[in-house]
Image: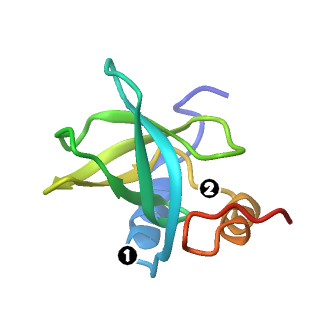
Amino acid sequence: MTATDWNTDIYAQAALEDRSAQRQRVNIPATLRPSGGQVFHTVVLDLALGGFCANALQRMSPGDRCWLKLPGTQGLQAEVVWWDAGRVGCAFANLLSPIVHDTILARYRGDGAFKRI
């Protein structure tokens, strides 16, 4: 399958709808790597199927690509939607699977403490 084999309009609409959906507040230690930049430690503050908000003291520009690495996951590609006063909002390149999303939420109580499930 090539990048043009699927309907990007449907994905864009689903991502937009999810970005306006209620997000789960979390406190998950992670790493974030801007395209062409160095990895830095961050804390994910909210998480949804379509994106996340995290601390990012280094300025990031809308449209930039980045990769988020949560504990127990591979790097998740995302695009910066906004950056303001040390926080960044990003949209995942591919929606998170509900199972992966729920597993991540089940592991964190909101205080950054990992819970075995």
Q: Secondary structure at mark 1?
A: loop
The quarter of the displayed image where residue 43 is located: bottom left
Alpha-carbon neighbours of circle 2 within 10 Å: few (<14), some, or many (≥20)?
some
Residue at mark 1: 20
Q: Residue at x 53, y 59 (%)?
A: 28
Amino acid of disc 2 = Leu
As drawn, the residue found furthest toward the bottom would be 22
**Residue 67: percent from left, percent from top:** 46, 35
Q: How many marks?
A: 2
Amino acid of disc 1 = Ser
Residue at mark 2: 96
Residue 96, compared with residue 39, is above or below; it is below
Q: Quick check: 45 left or right of 24?
A: left
Q: Residue at x 20, y 44 (%)?
A: 62
Q: Earlier in the sequence, mark 2 or mark 1?
A: 1
As drawn, the residue found furthest toward the left would be 85
